[in-house]
Amino acid sequence: MMRSLYSGVAGLKTHQTRMDVIGNNIANVNTTAYKSSSMTFSELMSQTTQKASGANATTGVGGTNAKQIGLGVKAGAINTAITTQGSAQSTGNPFDIMITGDNFFVVSNGSENFFTRDGSFYVDGAGNLAMTSTGYNVMGWGVDETTGNIKQDTVTALRIMSAANMTYPPEATTKANISGILDENDKDVTSANGKTVNLNFFDARGYSYTAKFTFKQSSGTASNEYSMELTKLLDSTGAEIDISKVKFGDNSTQTLQTPVTFAGDTYEWDGKQLKTKADKKVVADLSAAFNADGTLIDTSTDEAAAKAQQETLDAIAAAYGYEGSTDEFLKLYQKDANGTEVTVETMLGNMAKTTTAQGDLVLTTDKDKPMTMDGRFFEGVKVIFDTDTGKLKQVGSNVTDFKTNVDFTPLGGNFSNITIDLSECTNYDNKGTSTIGATSGDLDGLGTGRRLGDMIGVFIQKDGMIYASYDNGMTKLLGQIATAAFANASGLEKEGDNLYSATLNSGEFDGIGVDITAGGGYMSPGQLEMSNVDLSSEFTEMITTQRGFQANSRIITVSDTLLEELTNLKR
């Protein structure tokens, strides 16, 4: 009777333990990545009252089985369904990550590593990726500064918001391309000012600039030939930068049969002075720009004289229809009787001489007798198209890949040499409209350059790679979240706070970890793994446990009644 009494007590204790397991599962039904536990029963031990005996061949008596009386029950094992995947819960938080597969995140409290399936992370004040519940650092691999690739070495804390990662360094533009249609009937192309194409680029410090290139068409039978010139360079504020030191192309000539007509209704020449016709006001005096021998006055050391000279030349250019295009006006030329190219600048110099020699070419001063200029000098490159196909034939001296260089480095070390690819330019009929335009970077998008970029977001890929995006269009690899895999994940020991630690039966962590994709798993940002507790199963287990507990309590009650009957015999 005492044996049955204690067996009942053992049954009560064991069922209570099972109820504790069930209660814990239900309590954690909404715990992130919680893994449910289950308990198995095992008999405690048996008391042998008679050993088993074998058959006796001599007497012919058969063998007998052992007589054993069980003494109760115990908890055989408490198993954790650690490899059973929980359902996904969408959160929209990019730092919430769910693991699909059997791997674990590696986290550290600063002295030792733990393992978890809880991917609820955030970025702490130091810029480290950490657990929201404990603040433990999420461990992973850094980026090799030499190669820019992940270096899988001993795991370290992932500091993704460091000062170095908050910005992306600027880079100078080294390549550009000009593409589109250059229509020979485009009025801009055939005008004196030409067709302007803007190229936006960056220097090494990330400052932006706009280079203005002009395409002008040759005249007559050379209408398939164009000049490409760098006319202006503006900084980000719109201020013009002196481009006299910039190297682009070379000195060349272009056929340009341009009529130059004097505005005789408005102006008149009085000796070496240009005056308004109405009130005889002097608007330009050649002596302010030229020496007596017809050469330009050197004004390099006299700012006031330089200003007066420029104003004089500007006024004369305006009188001949080239207002705002003084340099263009001065570079026009006409061939003399000997075939020598005489520029407008030289013609003005001839007019400024004390005595103009017979045969010297001078500008017309009669509005009714325009002069036809044979061409113009320019600094740049010739762009020549094939008249049969409309495709490029030559850019400068290049007849193969149709590239040219503009070297801005004389402006300072932060500038660079930019290679411009014109191979996608064509000379087709587009109803008088040109579509030609310039873009930084080559046709593959390389060498574009960029300004300084500020971090605008962080995203995590399925393999745990962490990238930052910047407002200059760049992305940067910041690190990779490492994972741990165990031969027997059920052998991990629970440490609370959704953490596990390695044991002798789970297998050791090598300190490096594995790429989650190596085992076919992956990470899902913006999601969390829910508890894998099945409430229907838990309630069923609760019912059977309750009934088992009740049955064992009856054993104690009955055993007590039997003992009571025994004591009553004394009466």
Image (cartoon, helix red, strand yellow):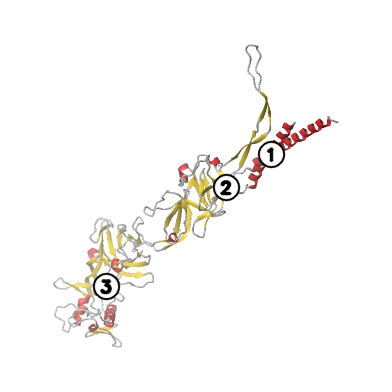
The residue that mark 3 highlights is: 328
x and y, in percent, of residue 18 in the image:
66, 40
Q: Is residue 197 above or below residue 81?
A: below
Q: For marks 3 and 2, give the CA distance.
A: 82 Å
x and y, in percent, of residue 524 in the image:
51, 49
Q: Residue furthest bottom?
A: 279
| The C terminus lies in quadrant | top right
Viewer-proximal residue among 127 and 249: 127
Q: Is residue 60 above or below residue 538?
A: above
Tell me: 378 left or right of 44.
left
Q: Amino acid at mark 3?
A: Glu
**Count the marks: how many?**
3
The residue that mark 1 highlights is: 13
Q: Is residue 245 above or below residue 429?
A: below
**Residue visible at 27% across and 72% down in the picture:** 328
Location of residue 363 by image quarter = bottom left
Location of residue 345 by image quarter = bottom left
Q: Residue furthest front?
A: 570
Asked whether residue 211 is in view, the answer is: yes
The residue that mark 2 highlights is: 495
Number of other residues with Cα within 10 Å of mark 1, as a class: few under 14, some 14 to 19, many 20 or more: some
- Local secondary structure at mark 2: strand
- Local secondary structure at mark 1: helix
